[in-house]
Amino acid sequence: MSFQSHIKQLAAAGALALSVSGLSFCSPAFAQQTVKVGSVLSVTGPASFLGEPEDKTLRMYIEKINAAGGVAGKKIELVIYDDGGDANKARTFATRLIEDDKVVAMVGGSTTGTTMAMIPVFEEAQVPFISLAGAVEVIDPVRKYVFKTPHTDKMACQKIFENLKQRNFTKIAMISGTDGFGASMRAQCIKVAPAYGVQIVAEETYGPRDSDMTAQLTKIKSVAGIQAVINPGFGQGPAIVTRNYAQLGMSAIPLYQSHGVASKSFIELAGPAAEGVRLPAAALLVGDKLPDNDPQKKVVVGYKQTYEATAKQPVSTFGGHAYDGLFILVEAMKRANSTDAKKVRDEIEKTKGFIGTGGIVTMSPADHLGLDLAAFKMLEIKGGDWTLVKPGS
């Protein structure tokens, strides 16, 4: 029986309260038998739609892990800080995790901006850092102690362009957010477009606090021959773009979003305008629609049921990233039979065939993500819900 299967059987068991806002509640005797795992997340602020489900996921599963006996002979003590989406705060908290809390590993970093601010801290301290951010720059170039679980923005561009090619679309426009993720994905799409025979004939941008993108979309609408529009971005911006898109009568031109909006909150914010929008996302959003022989089905359906029953809110891929990061770490500790940071780092890098919510992960010294394009599903929003796009359509 796998470790993950074992803890699912103990899901109803009680567990110790671990930490809240970075404060530990362990007794001295318990503390001697624990291993500290850190997390810096954007639980509040503009990226809370990422950080909140990540926070809830880590807490609920660490309780289950501890109820099942812990890992490598120790209970996990979780130390979480909320950076509010602020990169400077994130770096400060990362330093605190290393210097004061003495964590052996870190699972966190909700955004690309906060992650990039924290990377030097963990690299210098030689402590494994499994990021939950989307941009490819997190793991390219490869850094010895930095890993990540979400599909990259480069992969999102490739998956979208793959679908464009299937539909014989060659001329597109982009409207991109200027946040760290939006800017990074824009750059990646520009790089990979020629390989798919795609020409970007119009481009616009918007800021993270902009509340109306009608002007930018009107300019795009005026360009003749555009066959599709791509919106690299996350947060509320893409929902506003989607609503303005429909208001301008542009719905006849296919609109693609990124995996940065892969949560039910996007559909709710965009409303009826979301109908027909396509985006690449993890299998987690369509777990119940996967064939029974899909190796991910049991994992994603199990996570979805556990999360929604505990958190009382719809599952998102973002909490799934935290699930994957936590269990990649736990399995590495088990294989190392140790909580030594360097030994754990080595085992994370040896992760092979790990079935997570984001895909089947196989890492190597040259690949600290371990996912390929097959891990991405192309989805379309229909009737206010996610549907799988059939191959070739």
Image (cartoon, rainbow, N blue to C red):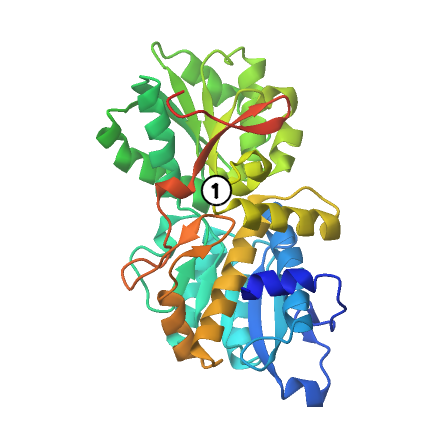
Residue 49 placement: quadrant: top right
Label total for image: 1
Given residues 265 and 30, the one toward you in this image is: 30
Residue drawn at the location 61% of the way across and 51% of the way down = 303
Residue drawn at the location 44% of the way across and 46% of the way down = 180
Quadrant where the N terminus is found in the figure: bottom right
Kindly identify the amino acid type of the residue bearing the numbered disc 1: Asp
Residue 142 placement: quadrant: bottom left
- Which residue, given by chain and number where applicable, does mark 1 sit on? 294
Q: Is residue 111 left or right of residue 49?
A: left
Which secondary structure lies at badge 1? Answer: loop
Quadrant where the C terminus is found in the figure: top left
371 over 96 or under it: above or below:
above
Q: Position of residue 280 (x, y in %)?
A: 45, 35
Q: Is residue 264 visible?
A: yes
Q: Residues within 10 Å of mark 1 (few under 14, many from 20)?
A: few
Given residues 20 and 286, the one toward you in this image is: 286
Q: Position of residue 200 (x, y in %)?
A: 30, 24
Q: Is residue 82 left or right of residue 184?
A: right
Residue 56 placement: quadrant: bottom right
Residue drawn at the location 72% of the way across and 51% of the way down = 311
44 over 195 or under it: above or below:
below
Q: Position of residue 134 (x, y in %)?
A: 44, 48
Q: Is residue 201 visible?
A: no
Q: Position of residue 245 (x, y in %)?
A: 53, 19
